[in-house]
Amino acid sequence: MNNLMESENIFLGLLKKELVIALGCTEPVAIAYVAALAKEQLKGKEITSVEAALSGNMIKNAMAVTIPGTTDCGVDFAIAMGLIAGDSTKKLEVLSGVNQEDIEKVKTLLALGIISVSVADTDKKLYVEIVVHAGEQYAKVILSDEHTRVVLIEVDGQIVYKDSTVEELAAADEDKGTVLNLDKLWQFVMQVDIGKLGLIKQSIELNKKVAQEGLDGSYGLQVGKTLRDGIKKGYFNNDFATYAMSLTAAGSDARMAGVLMPVMSNSGSGNQGLCATLPVVAVGEKLAVDEEKMIRALTLSHLITIYIKSKFGRLSALCGAAIAGTGASSGITYLLGGNLEQIKYAIQNMLGNVTGMLCDGAKAGCAMKVSTCINAAVQSAIMALEGRCIKETDGIIEQDVEYTIDNLCRLGNQGSLAADKIILDIMLNKKVF
């Protein structure tokens, strides 16, 4: 197999692995998935108690975001939804069949007070362990590292399933990260047959529908609608920057408010999927580009997001919208006629701008962070097209953009550990008046 074909297979494999349809915020949905899977092991027996231990990042991202199909939030609510209405075979669409009767049953279950939640004693950022008891019997399910990667199923002391490939898969992903780079990524995007990019086309369809729902309805903080209506009131110009911000924020508004509509996620996050897709779509529509150019721009956006996230990790104290916005800025630069050098400039500009945005959990306010990152994405692209790039003397920026990405990932993987603990402590100990 020649090097070009090998690279193509790797990139297509990454798209297949990381572009996944998801319904609702992926952290509470992953919790519901584990709960549903654990309950299914007990084959219909009456549940008497539930114990859940989660990593701090999982708790942080499941505390305040609305559970799909409801107006409620909370880790215990996500667990109860998985127990009552979850179908584990649907994975990140585990709650797609939820109805009002299910919600009433969930509230009845929660009133019993049989669900306990604690912070897991683990260094892993993505970790869920749920033990469901039915009298003397129990089922334990552990999920780790990725939102649907179950590593253990145990029933009454017997191991039903154990994933022995976790370390091997992590090593394989790390190997891919060392052989891939932005030059190879660009070559793939420019040469791949767009007939092989069905997932990219699907990301447009799904994410645009959710964004339109956000504009039509009244979800969350209505950030997207506020921007759109601000154009009519003369607060904003009707340019592609405002349209990109409005469209993307509207998608986040609806998703964070629990709309029962799936999105195409990117690297385990629906908001990252929206941010990597919708700004590029918005600019492409304003420029009236043809389908092929749109698909290639979106492929570039999604893959740069995946590439950075593969080094950065699934969860962090830094906001993932900044990374997906970096992908979007690259795609926008390409749509506006930019070359590889200018795309690298756009990445440098983004990573020198919004890198410090903190993640303080999934919530309605995420739509505001999304709009901020998309505004920065457009600005970074325009500056790049003018040949303007943050200098290597400044902050975390290096002369080689690959090293800048490594610096960002060092911040996300090492530097954010203390911030994560402080953010979670603040969230768990808020003063309510």
Image: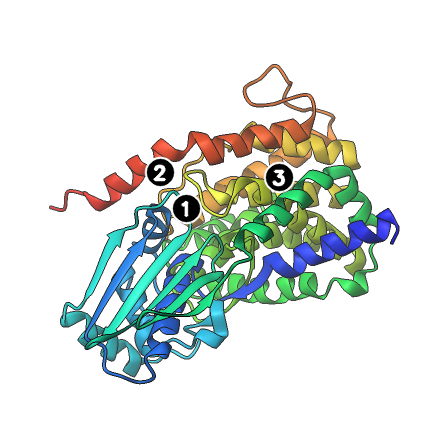
Does dot 1 land on a helix, a strand or a loop?
loop
Residue drawn 46% across and 55% down? 252
Q: Report the amino acid beneath label 3.
A: Val
Q: Which of 238 and 175 is in front in this view?
A: 175
- Label 3 near label 2: C-beta < 8 Å? no
Foreground label between 2 and 1: 1
Viewed as shown, does residue 208 lie left or right of 320? Answer: right
Residue 354: percent from the left, percent from the top?
51, 33
What is the C-alpha distance between the residues marked 2 and 1? 10 Å
Q: Nearer the N terminus, badge 3 or badge 1?
A: 1
Q: Which of 315 and 219 is in front in this view?
A: 315
Does dot 3 land on a helix, a strand or a loop?
helix
Residue drawn 18% across and 76% down? 108
Is residue 293 at least partly visible in the picture? yes
Residue 144: percent from the left, percent from the top?
44, 55
Q: Name the residue under label 3.
A: 378
Q: Mark 2 points at which residue?
A: 420
Q: Report the amino acid beneath label 2.
A: Asp
Place residue 428 in its image quadrant.
top left
Q: Residue 125 carries which label?
A: 1
- Label 1 near label 2: C-beta < 8 Å? yes
Foreground label between 2 and 3: 2
How many numbered discs sit on the rendered protein?
A: 3
Q: Residue furthest front?
A: 158
Q: Report the amino acid beneath label 1.
A: Lys
> Is residue 413 positioned above or below 158 on the image?
above
